[in-house]
Amino acid sequence: MTTANKITIFRILLIPFFAVLLIYHGRTGHDLYRLLALLTFLLAAVSDGIDGYIARRYNQRSELGAILDPLADKLLLVVGLVLLTINNRPHLEPIPLWLTATVFSRDFILFIGMVILHYTFGQVKVRPHWTGKIATVLQMIVIVWCLLEWDTRGLTSWSVAAASFTGMSSVFYLVDGIRQLSRSPTSAASPQQEEN
């Protein structure tokens, strides 16, 4: 249990608090819940950078961290996108449904691809792509923008950018998955046996 992994687990534990605060704000409209949700989200986002730095700087990369870190990011973003897409008017301007649908579609495609690769190879090698990293950052910006109650046009613009990079990253991951499958002996056509 490295320091980086402890920070990642702390980030995972913040997610239920973040969810509860968003739900309470949606029901009551009290700004205190919104501000606490914003601070919780920012703390989780900052801790993501910290545990990544510690893992690289002090060579604390581990198999557990390779699983927990992306899981923590995904859970945080999914909770934020889903709860903020639900119609929170008049308290908050909701995140566009098409952005959340794009994110879920990309993740579903990746999940199916990972299952296929795991069945084919016995292990999955997911190579992070820069479009995926930018998509994650843009999704975080959308959530923060929404919680800050800034103008709707800005929320729409950031959502378009986040959806665009999310879609691009899905294409790159799909191409990489197909490339890995094409190198598998099981993907080659089996020779037809001659009939006696």
Image (cartoon, rainbow, N blue to C red):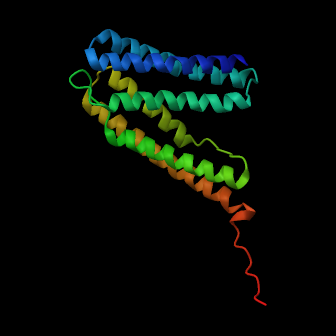
Q: Is residue 142 visible?
A: no
Q: Position of 8 compared to 62: left or right?
A: left
Q: Residue furthest bottom?
A: 196
Q: Residue furthest left?
A: 90
Q: Residue furthest front?
A: 196
Quarter of image, res 13: top right
Q: Position of 15 compared to 187: left or right?
A: left
Quarter of image, res 126: top right
Tell me the quarter of the image containing the N terminus.
Answer: top right
Number of numbered discs overlaid on the protein picture: 0
Q: Residue at x 68, y 28 (%)?
A: 65
Q: Residue at x 48, y 46 (%)?
A: 106
Q: Position of 137 compared to 188: left or right?
A: left
Estimate the x, y position of residue 172 in percent, counting from the top left.
55, 51
Above or below, 69 relative to 96 = above
Estimate the x, y position of residue 117 in percent, counting from the top left.
65, 52
Q: Residue furthest right?
A: 196
Q: Is residue 10 visible?
A: yes
Q: Position of 90 compared to 8: left or right?
A: left
Above or below, 46 relative to 194 = above
Above or below, 122 relative to 133 = below
Please state which of residues 134 and 187 is positioned toward the viewer in this rendering: 187
Estimate the x, y position of residue 100 in percent, counting from the top left.
38, 39
Above or below, 177 relative to 90 = below
Tell me the quarter of the image containing the C terminus.
Answer: bottom right
Estimate the x, y position of residue 180 in percent, counting from the top left.
67, 56
Q: Residue at x 66, y 17 (%)?
A: 6
